[in-house]
Image (spheres, rainbow, N blue to C red):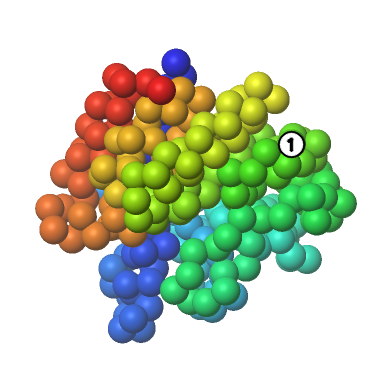
Amino acid sequence: MMDLRLHMNLDAVVSLRGRRGTAEPEPAAVAMLAELAGVHGLSISRVEERRELLDRDVRLLREIIRTRLNLRLVPGGDLAAIAFDTRPQRITLISEPQSRQALPSGLDVNLLKDALRKHFQTLRDADIEVAVHILPDLDQVKAAHRVSVDVIELDAVGYTAARTPAERRVELVRLVDAATTAARLGMRVALSGGLDLRSAEELSRLTHASELHVGHDLVARSVLVGVERAVGDFLQAMARGRQRPL
């Protein structure tokens, strides 16, 4: 079974800072604490709102962190400029969120395949790893393989938001099937979307998952117990889940 890595999404820190329009909390400071506590990667989304401040965040993160930086953004004409300017280790292409509060739904790789191929060539020219955030749909997984994606980030919201055990079982099967297919096609698999301690432990059981991306719940737990302990709690939950593979 492959190693499982924890990535912290900093978007909740950015949102918290934006509520008061101040400089605090500083995403880079939170990132450094998380890195010291053992996270394996850090993610941040670049959206049009507060773009200049976010660009500063990305440049600062790129300079100070030693773990992998994953920049999440919507495909657009300025992608090449962003890639060559910031040079994160990975760029994950996401769909446009429907509102400020909403999480992005899965990118439609089938619909955007021609444009994505051009974007991906640009990213590879900059020696940047390519990922897409998609729903756990086999057609989308296969489409991602056809455009030569390195990593698929499967949206697990269907599982984490399920209200009944039966719904969770259905969504778990979708995630397992998508992850298994992706691994068979040579792509690495990340899981994201509403993960808390319980779901992080449960989804760590997926043998083909190599990363869990946690945002809001990790930041929320950090408010209660501190960043170091919060990261440690998630790493321990993941280790427990890994001991009971599906």
Q: Label 1 is placed on what type of residue? A: Lys
Q: Residue at x 55, y 53 (%)?
A: 71
| View extreme (front): residue | 166
Is residue 171 depicted above or below 189 in this figure?
below
Residue 242, quarter of picture: top left
Is residue 27 depicted above or below 118 in this figure?
below
Q: Residue at x 37, y 78 (%)?
A: 18
Q: Residue at x 39, y 56 (%)?
A: 161
User: In which quadrant of the rendered image does the N terminus lie?
Assistant: top left
Label 1 residue SS: helix
Residue 95, quarter of picture: bottom right
Is residue 87 in view from this perspective? no
| View extreme (top): residue | 1
Q: Nearer the viewer, residue 23 or 198?
A: 198
User: In which quadrant of the rendered image does the C terminus lie?
Assistant: top left
- Relative horizontal placement of residue 30, taking residue 127 as reference (left or right): left
Residue 34: x %, y % from top left: 29, 46
Residue 40: x %, y % from top left: 39, 36
Residue 144: x %, y % from top left: 73, 40
Q: Residue at x 62, y 49 (%)?
A: 134
Is residue 9 depicted above or below 141 in this figure?
below
Is residue 96 in view from this perspective? yes
Is residue 243 depicted above or below 227 in this figure?
above
Q: Nearer the viewer, residue 93 or 179?
A: 179
- Relative horizontal placement of residue 238, taking residue 103 as reference (left or right): left
Q: What residue is disc 1 on?
A: 142
| View extreme (bottom): residue | 20
Residue 65: x %, y % from top left: 41, 45
